[in-house]
Amino acid sequence: MPDAGNPTPATDSSRAQVRRGHVLFRAPSPAVAYGLIFLLDAALAALLFLPDLGRFLEGLLIVWLLPSVLTALVTPPLCAALGGRLEFHRSSFLVLTTLVLLLPIAALWRLAAGVEPSFVPGLAYLGVFLAGPMFWFRHSSLYGVSYPSHARMLAPSLLQPVLYLAGLFVIYPPTPLLFGEAVTFLALAFIAALALIRASDRPIRREFGISGVSLIRPLLDHVGDRDPEATGALEEFFEKGAIPGNLVARAVTFSRDGTVKATLALPTVHPGPFAALGSSDLPRKLTEKLGAGAGAVIVPHTPCDHDLDLPSDREVDRVAAALREILAEPRKAEANRASPLVSPYDGSIARAQLLGDVVLVVVSQAPAPTDDIAYSVADRIVREVAQEGGPRVVLVDAHNSYVEGKGDIIYGTPLAEKLVADAKAAVRAAVAAARDGPVEVGTAARTGYSIGRDGIGPEGFRSLVVRVGGTTTGYVVIDGNNLLIGLWEPIARALRERVDVVEVCTTDNHVVHEVDGGINPVGERYPLEGLIRESRAVLEAAVADLTPVSVQFGERNVSDVPILGPGYTTRLLTSLGDTLSMFTYMFAATLLLLLTSSLVILLALR
């Protein structure tokens, strides 16, 4: 069960215990893989040697099973000796998928032989024919997942087909023709693999000047193991395309007796691009970098998009340093003027709460789709409120009603104009509703969720409760990428049974993208009743934690920070889409070309 209580800075070991779940795609366990390998080897041996039972048993052992097991065991150390890397579970999975590829080819051959036995070459020729696609698939795979070098990956790629052919030639003693055909098929397979890799590599190389295939191994190591070297390689790729930008680090702190109880960290940084790269996983990173002196750290999503992704952890360090400067400022001890979270009128997509000398504006279109708000829209609101003599403003994008491709608020659109008007009206309403008197704040957190199983990041559920003049406002912030449309209302309705006003937000943390399925919005994997239960539990814990505090606000400009900038993500996604399309096409095309050319040679030399 998740842990309840106030959040505390986590150690490396405790972070390692957070289960990330199924990242991208997880290979089966060795026991499952070897069981499936045995079944596939038996099926292939049956297609190649039956109805001769004795030859089937001999072929199963020395042609299929022994080469498969030896290949799975020897490939990892062989790759390592040549400068690559392949884990044993991935090695067995590669053997398994290679056999999956060969099975329909062998089955079609036997079917054709049953229909036209006089035309289809015999089973010995089928045996040498299969070595080509076996080598093609292994080399195309190992070049990406082990080491991007044709020369270094040649021996590991040839291991399975060579062992297989050695066993095959024990049963079918090779004639010069049969041996020559085997060599020819392997040569054709290598050419086909070169074509596949080169074509798949072209879109990213053309756009960014770097091999996209060379990023596969670092991506696997970063997602699977958080390997520092792999993380560095990927962040170096992002840094090459970064441009300088000016960021603002803002923080609302709640202090008691000169000690910070809680920090609402609100930098103008987008928690992307992916996994834990750059500013992705921003809530966890800021919690750790701010340390115990920040109290309970809550990092809602501020209005910005992928233009303000940070390419590496170094930039996150600069933002955290600016926030620590704010925390180091002297704490005030006097009472504060504050208001509950109020809405200016029905249909407003902005609500506001005055906290000391700053107004927190929370933006949500729920139950309509809600997604990223352009930074320029938020910046305009801040500037116009200041020009009109209003208080300082910070904005939160609640990011709590997900529909793919909908809900963005873009500068210059009617929706952006509505937000500007609603936000300014909400600020005025919050100022009008403010009262002098004590402010009470409580916080709580529930962590220990799985990204793969629950769709929730390492910061879990966090709650901030603010009681002003007898009115209690509760915020629940879920560490995830948006909330499925339709879930906000039942969660908020349940929470309003405990507090007067409530808002449910997500952090837009892109660490949750590293699973099979990609976007992984909150509610897709974790059921609604569970979200309600956990949200109520963390809110009630925060209510029980209410104590009087003083409220402070601070901000720092962080200039010339590398950011991914406008258009970078679009370029990258377009290139990745082109790569996927090219790979899909060339995978089929090169395999078909390999099979066709090999078959032509086989028939011509009969």
Image: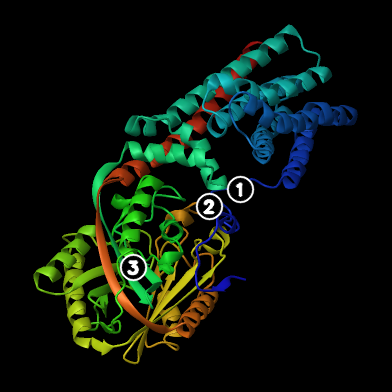
Q: Residue 336, relative to residue 554: is it above or below?
A: below
Q: Quadrant of the C terminus?
A: top right
Q: Which mark is first along the chain, 3 or 2?
A: 3
> Would you call the spot at circle 1 few (<14 residues within 10 Å), some (14-19), or many (20 or more)?
some
Q: Position of residue 180 (x, y in %)?
A: 67, 10
Q: CA distance from mark 1 to mark 2?
A: 9 Å
Residue labelled with disc 1: 26
Task: Mark yes or no: residue 535 visible.
Answer: yes
Q: Residue at x 58, y 70 (%)?
A: 2
Instruction: Judge by depth and name the residue closer to the eye, 290 or 566.
Output: 290
- Of marks 3 and 1, the one in the foreground: 1
Q: Is residue 580 visible?
A: no
Assess disc 2: are there few (<14), some (14-19) or many (≥20) residues with their C-alpha within 10 Å of its C-alpha.
Answer: some
Question: How far apart are the alpha carbons under marks 2 and 3?
Answer: 24 Å
583 left or right, relative to 410: right
| Horizontal relation, residue 403 to residue 78: left or right | left
Q: Which residue is mark 3?
A: 369
Asked which secondary structure carries label 2, the reply is: loop
Residue drawn 37% across and 33% down? 203
What amino acid is labelled 2 in the image? Answer: Asp
Identity of the residue drawn at 18% across and 71% down: 418
Q: Nearer the viewer, residue 310 or 155?
A: 310
Type of the residue with mark 3:
Pro
Quadrant occupied by the N terminus:
bottom right
The answer to whether 324 appears left or right of 53 in the picture is: left
* Mark 3, other Cα within 10 Å: few <14 / some 14–19 / many ≥20: many
The dot on residue 516 is 2
- Which amino acid lies under the numbered mark 1 shown in the image of this protein? Arg
Contact (Cβ within 8 Å) of mark 3 with mark 1: no
At 59% from the left and 16% from the top, the residue drawn is: 187
Q: Are marks 1 and 2 in contact (CB under 8 Å)?
A: no
Left or right of residue 434, residue 367 in this image: right
